[in-house]
Structures are given as structure tokens and as C-alpha cells.
Image (tube, rainbow, N blue to C red):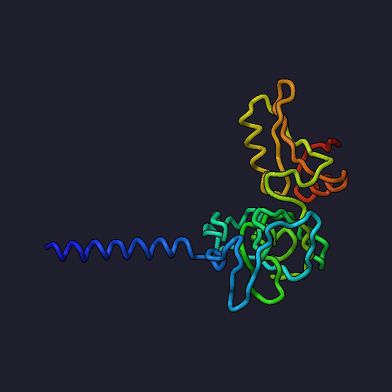
Amino acid sequence: MKYFLLIIYFLLIGCSTKEYVTKVYNTPYATTPTKKPYSINGQMYFPMNSVNIGWTQRGIASWYGPDFHGRYTSNGEIYNMYAYTAAHKTLPMNTIVKVTNLNNNKSVIVRINDRGPFIKGRIIDLSYAAGKKIGLDVTGTAPVIIKVIGFKGKNYVTGFKVQIGAFINKNGAIVLSNRYKNLGYNTAVLKIGRFYKVYITGFKTYNEAKKFMIENKISGFIIGD
């Protein structure tokens, strides 16, 4: 009986370990280091410790979606194909980049939270939502230019903001703010007088804010800092 119980114990340990490994290492990028040099298919990559605002790169963009939705990204987040995120081989995690499709001039702003793509010539792998916004859901890939515009948690562009709502109840303002937080710009809830006002912030110019409102079908008005 003692040996039988030991066998059962080791079988259970083996099963739980297998389940954990499957859960953690179930995307192409999940085991990729986020900061240290790493090798994929014999190719060495050296993640940047920092990058300057305005840094650019040209190459081919692709997208990844349903097969990886709900799984882990390289930095340990859960991949959400409807969020505006992307994989890049060397940019620091949480770098905010603007990606412009050079075939149609459509742009999208994404946050780097994954590593890849590891296919020759490709420089960035966009989430499904981000890829769709610039037409990759139709073409699959496209030549792009990516530009670093900031970092998560920082106001990476300044100048103009769009007021999208005003509430007496703070909870309503927070709900509205959360609805727009994945569009690449910061959102803010400020109490002004008796109202909680909701803003999308960080536009460099009036025209940039106006274009953003049109593309995302957002009602509101633009305020200059």
C-alpha cells in the first residue's frame, strides 16, 4: 500500500507539472526573455534597455489573433486579440509605438507586450484589433513604419485632449474612461466643480485629435492645453 501511494503521488506531481508547462509555454513568444539577450532558431536578439522618443523602423508588419487569444505573452500578460498591443523583437516592454501602413497610410497606436515576429523581414506582429485597423486583416502583411511615441504610464504626447463625457456619478465616468483606454492614448477622469469629466489626452495637434475622433467615431469636443 505504501508503494502504491508513492506511485499515485508521483503521477499527480507529473500531471500537475505538465499542466503548468502547457499553460505557461503556449505561445511562440512566451518563453522569450523580455530584457536579456536570447536566441531563436540560431539568431541572437538583444533587447534594448531604453529607446528615444522618435525612434523609427521600416519593415513588414503581420498580425496574430484567435490561436493565441487568452494565452500568455512574453512578459507574462494574457494576450487579448482585441487590445491594441504588439510583439517586437527588441523594443522595451510597454513602449508605445505608432504603426503606419505604407500602402494605405492608415495608422494605429499599440503597446509592446510580446516578443516576435521571428520571420525574416517582419519587424512587428500586431494584435488582431490593431492589425484590422490598418487593413492587415485583409492583406495579412504590409510594409510599415513604426515610430516610438512614448511609454505606458507616461503622457507621451501633449497639447490637446478630447472631452468625451461629464458625470455627476464618478462610477459612470470610470466606466466610460475604461471603454476607451485601449485606443493608444491616455484617458483621465477629473473632478471639475460638481462633475467628473472624462478626457482622452495626449494629442500633439488639433488635427491629430480630430482625426482620432473621426476614425473611432467618438463624439466630444477638443480642448487645447
Give me the residue at 67% from left, 64% from top.
90
Residue that lies at the very extreme toward the top in this rendered image: 194
Quadrant in the picture for residue 120: bottom right
Which residue is drawn at the image coordinates 64% and 56% (left, top)? 93
Establish if 2 lies above or below 201.
below
Left or right: where does residue 35 sit relative to residue 151? Answer: left
- Which quadrant of the rendered structure holds the N terminus? bottom left
Q: Position of residue 8 (x, y in %)?
A: 22, 63
Q: Quadrant of the C terminus?
A: top right
> Of 37 and 95, which appears nearest the observer?
37
> Which of 80/98 is in front?
98
Q: Position of residue 170 (x, y in %)?
A: 64, 28
Q: Position of residue 179 (x, y in %)?
A: 65, 42
Judge left or right: residue 117 versus residue 193.
Answer: left
The image quadrant of residue 56 is bottom right
Above or below, comparing residue 102 to residue 187 in the picture: below
At a point 59% along the width and 74% down the height, the residue shown is 40
181, 220: nearer the viewer: 181
